[in-house]
Amino acid sequence: MAGTDPTERRQFAFTTRPHMAVDDTTGDPIGLDDLDSRVRWLLDLITGAETELLTRLWQPATFDTLAAGREGDGRALPKHGHVAAARLGWTPTYPDDVCVPSRVSRVVTAQATATLRTLTYRDTAIASLSARFDPATGHIAPPTGGEVYVPSGFARGVRRQLVARTRRGDEATSDAPTSDVAQPERLRITDIQTPPKVTAMARLAAADKQLAELTVTDRTMELTVKLPTAASPTRRAHWQRVRLTAVLPPHLHGRPITGWHLPTLTLDGRGLLLRCAATEAVPAPDLPAATVAVGVDWSPATLGAAAITTDTGDGLISDLRGYTYDDRGLGIKLARLQTEGQFLHRKAARLRQLAENAPPQVRSELEAKIAVLDENRAAVGAKRGKINRELAFHFARQVADYAVAADATMIAVEDLATLEPRGRGRVNNNRAAQSARHKAADALAHTAARVGVVVVTVPAKGSSAWCPGCNEELARPKGYHDAWCGSCRLGGNRDYVAGVNLAKRGLLGRGKAVRTRGGGVKVRTTEHAPVRKCRDKTGPTPGRPRHRRVRHSVPAPTPAEGVNTLKSRPAPEASVWDTVEPAASEDVSGSREERESGPPGT
C-alpha cells in the first residue's frame, strides 16, 4: 500500500467561528448580529433554489442519467457537480427581480447534484427489491444472481416502506384482480418517497475566488466571501465582500498541513459556524509488511475493546489479553439522554394527535407546549452530539496509544455496514444502534494515521462466536461475556477473543486490501489460520489516567451558638467532567458574549 513517497495526503475536518467581520471594500466593522443576518439571507436563497431544483428533478429519468454516468450523446458526466449540472441543463430558479451571482448558482447545483447522486444507489436498490417483493406475503424473495448488493438492514427498511404502501393501497391496485395484485411491481424511489429536505448550508468549495477566498496564517484564518446586504437583492450593489477573521484550534498549531479548503457556512444557536477542511501529510503505512495488528471489537458493554495478534512467520500468536476502554461514565449519561429524548418525542407526537381535533383555543395551547418540547428535544440532541464527539476522540486516542506501545502498524475494526445490533431486546438494540461507533471509527482512522498506523475494516460476522484456533463455535460456560473452546483450550473474555479474530483477519487479508471511495482500507474476505496462545505477555499495559474528583475548597462556616459541630455534612457531589488537568484558557471558537463590532481590520 505504500508508495515511493514516505508520506501520504489525508483530509480532515474541523470547525471554528469568526470573532471579527469587516467590509472588505471600506474596512468598516460589521457586528456579529449583522453578519448572521447576511449569512441567513444567503442560506435562504440557496435553500429555496435547491429545494425547487430537487422537486423539479425528482423523476426516474434523472436517476437513470446519474446511474448511467453519461449524457444523452454518450459522453461521461464530469465528477464536479456544478459542471455535470451545466452539461445536463439543470439551472436553478429564483424569485422575480432577485439578482444572484452565477457562483451562488454553482453552489446550489453542486449541492443538489451531490444529493441526487447519493440517492441514485437507493433508487437502484429499491427497484431491485420491489421487483422481488410479494404484496400478498409482505416478504422479499432472495436474489437470483447478478443483482445489486443490498445490506440486510437497508433491505428491511425498504420492505417496511413497501408494506406500508401496500396497506395504504393504490386505487388501481385495489380495483385490479387478485392475480394481478400478486404480481411484483418494479417501483422507483420517486414512487415511495418525496424529495428530501434541504439543509441550510453553503458549500463554498464549489465556487472560485469571485465568491470566496481563503487565507491562512500561523494561527489565524481569514475568509473573504460575498454576502447580500438585503433579504431580496435586486442588483449587484446589494452583494458586498466581507472579510471574516477566525482563530485556528490549538490542535492544528504546528501540524504539517499542505492545503486549506474553502469552508461550509452554517448557522446554529450561537451564530455563524465555519465547517472547514484541510489536507495533512501523514506517514505512509506499509500494510503488506505489517506483523503486529490490534483488533478492535465494538462491545455492547462499553464503546470498544482491543486485543493484539502477532505474525511471527511460523504462525499467529496472541496472549488473549486485551484492553477495555473506560468511557468514564459517559455511556450511562448518553443512555439517559437518549431515553429523555425519546420520551419528549413521544409526548410531542401525542400532543399533535390531540391538537388535530381540538378547539382553536385548546389547539393554540397544545401548539405552545409542542414548541417547548421540540426545543427541549433539540437541546438534548445537541448535548448528545457533543458528548459523542468527545467520547469518540478520547477512545481513538487511547486505542492509538495502545497500538503504538505494542509496535503495531495495523488496527483492524469491524465493518459497521455488516454489523447489526440484534438479539438484545428492542431497548438495547436501539441504544447500540445510536452509539458513537461511526464517529469513533472516523476519529480512530484520523488519529492513528498521524502516528503511522493504518486502520483496516474487516468483516464482522462470527468474530466473537468462532474460535481463533480451530474456527469452531465457542461455548459460553459462564455467561454472555465468557468464551471457551473445549478442543483448543482457548478462551477468555468475549470481547478480547473477538479482537484476536479481527486482528487475525486483518493480518491474513493485508495482501488483498483495497482502497474504498472514501479513502479507507478494507478487507472483504475472511481467511482462517490457527492462532496459538503464547505464555508470554505480548501486549502492553496501557496507563489509565485517574480522573480525580476535584472539589473547590470553601472556608468552613462559623457555627452558630448552640449548634452541634460534630454533626457531619455531606460534601457536594463531584462531576465526571472534573479532571486533574485544568481547562485550556485560550478561546479558539470565538466568543459570542460580547457581540459588538471589533476594531477595523485595517
Image (tube, grey):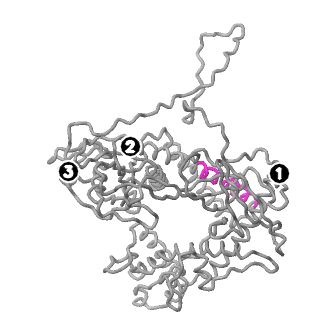
Please tell me whether residue 544 belongs to the stretch shown in magenta: no
Nearer-N-terminus badge (2/1)? 2
Residue 298 image point, x, y percent: 39, 50
The residue at 31%/56% (across/down) is: 506
**Residue 435 visible in image:** no
In screen coordinates, is 373 left or right of 303?
A: right
The residue at 48%/38% (across/down) is: 328
Query: Which residues are drawn in magenta?
Result: 364-383
The residue at 34%/77% (across/down) is: 141
Q: Residue furthest front?
A: 4
Residue at numbered disc 2: 404
Look at label 1 and name its amino acid. Answer: Pro
Compare residues 160 and 556 and report the one nearer the observer.
556
Which disc number belongs to residue 313? 3
Residue 480 image point, x, y percent: 31, 46
Q: Is residue 320 above or below residue 176?
A: above
Q: Is residue 358 above or below residue 381?
A: below
Residue at numbered disc 1: 600
Name the magenta segment's main secondary structure: helix
Nearer-N-terminus badge (3/1)? 3
Residue 488 image point, x, y percent: 16, 47
